Image (spheres, rainbow, N blue to C red):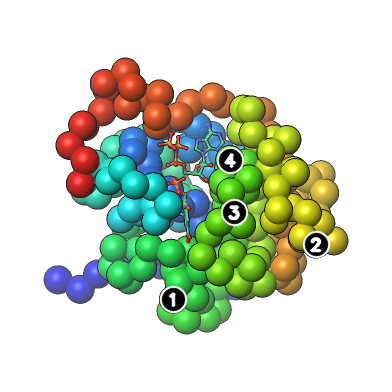
Amino acid sequence: MRYQFPYASKGQVIGLLGGSFDPAHEGHAHITREALKRFGLDRVWWLVSPGNPLKTRGPAPLADRVARARQVMQHPRVDVTDIEAHLGTRYTAQTIARLQAIYPQVRFVWLMGADNMAQFHLWQDWRGIMQSVPVGVLARPGQRISARMSRAAALYAPYRIAGRYGQLLAHAHAPAWSFVNVPMNDASSTAIRAKGNWSTQAG
Ligand SMILES: Nc1ncnc2c1ncn2[C@@H]1O[C@H](COP(=O)(O)OP(=O)(O)OP(=O)(O)O)[C@@H](O)[C@H]1O
Ligand SMILES: O=C(O)c1ccc[n+]([C@@H]2O[C@H](COP(=O)([O-])O)[C@@H](O)[C@H]2O)c1
């Protein structure tokens, strides 16, 4: 059966939250709701990754992670997808380029927690990502300072939109990024896995 890409109408602004979601938790749901509000997004798509290229540990099977993510995130403006598995992409720069080609009338905003901002300069073609989409960063416990001191934050400092004007991000031209100091939630997949409440079957 042909893969059904999510529907998006012309001019919509879609936030993309990529993640291992191994497993999804309330922290993901929380930053998604905050991103919808704080960055002026129409929708958010979760991109449940076939596997983070920087993580050596293989995650649980994709279908299990998608099923759990759909239980955790039930919101009329959020779609949980496994788009990358269908595109055959793992690197974010490639995923974004493909999505922009498939949806030329849609604006995408890349979303991530502060821990990923701190490491962003290790991602493949991270400058290319900054040049192609606005980036919305959400506070995460213990990670605010490292994100703000990160290489990406330093290099792109002139393009930062203050968090209180985060709504501007949706229609900003890249490069543009914003860090919002949302109330924090300390949930993490690592902690859930450590408690043994999730599939130990790595893919
Ligand atoms: N509690 C949280 N607060 C803010 N951002 C979060 C939180 N949990 C996850 N994120 C962000 O959501 C995205 C996907 O996260 P991921 O699936 O890796 O979850 P995780 O809890 O960080 O997993 P792990 O502990 O296995 O690294 C990342 O951008 C991450 O920064
Ligand atoms: O493109 C890269 O080089 C790259 C390196 C590390 C992480 N990512 C993406 O970042 C997102 C968050 O990953 P994770 O494992 O921290 O949930 C997910 O979409 C990954 O594919 C992407």
- Mark 4–mark 3 Cα distance, whole angstroms, equals 9 Å
Task: Give left or right: position of 200 versus 43.
Answer: left
Q: Nearer the viewer, mark 4 or mark 2?
A: 4
Q: Residues within 10 Å of mark 3 (few under 14, many from 20)?
A: many
Q: Is residue 43 visible?
A: no
Q: Do residues under tags 3 and 2 come within 8 Å of each other at their CB atoms?
A: no
Residue 96 location, x and y as percent? 49, 69
Which label number is shown at residue 159? 2
Residue that carries the numbered disc 1 in the rendered image? 98
Q: Nearer the viewer, mark 1 or mark 3?
A: 3
Closer to the camera, 70 or 85?
A: 85
Closer to the camera, 100 or 154?
A: 154
Query: Helix or strand or loop: what does disc 2 sit on?
Result: helix
Residue type at mark 3 is Phe
Residue that carries the numbered disc 4 in the rendered image? 115
Q: Earlier in the sequence, mark 4 or mark 1?
A: 1
> What residue lies at 20% left-to-right and 73% top-to-bottom?
2
Q: Is mark 4 within 8 Å of ligand 1?
A: yes
Task: Give left or right: position of 99 versus 12.
Answer: left
Q: Residues within 10 Å of mark 1 (few under 14, many from 20)?
A: some
Q: Nearer the viewer, mark 4 or mark 1?
A: 4
Q: Do residues under tags 2 and 1 come within 8 Å of each other at their CB atoms?
A: no
Residue 186 location, x and y as percent? 54, 24
Q: Is residue 128 visible?
A: yes
> What residue lies at 74% left-to-right and 43% top-to-bottom?
148
- Mark 4–mark 1 Cα distance, whole angstroms, equals 25 Å
Closer to the camera, 189 or 121?
A: 121
Which label number is shown at residue 120? 3
- Mark 3–mark 2 Cα distance, whole angstroms, equals 16 Å
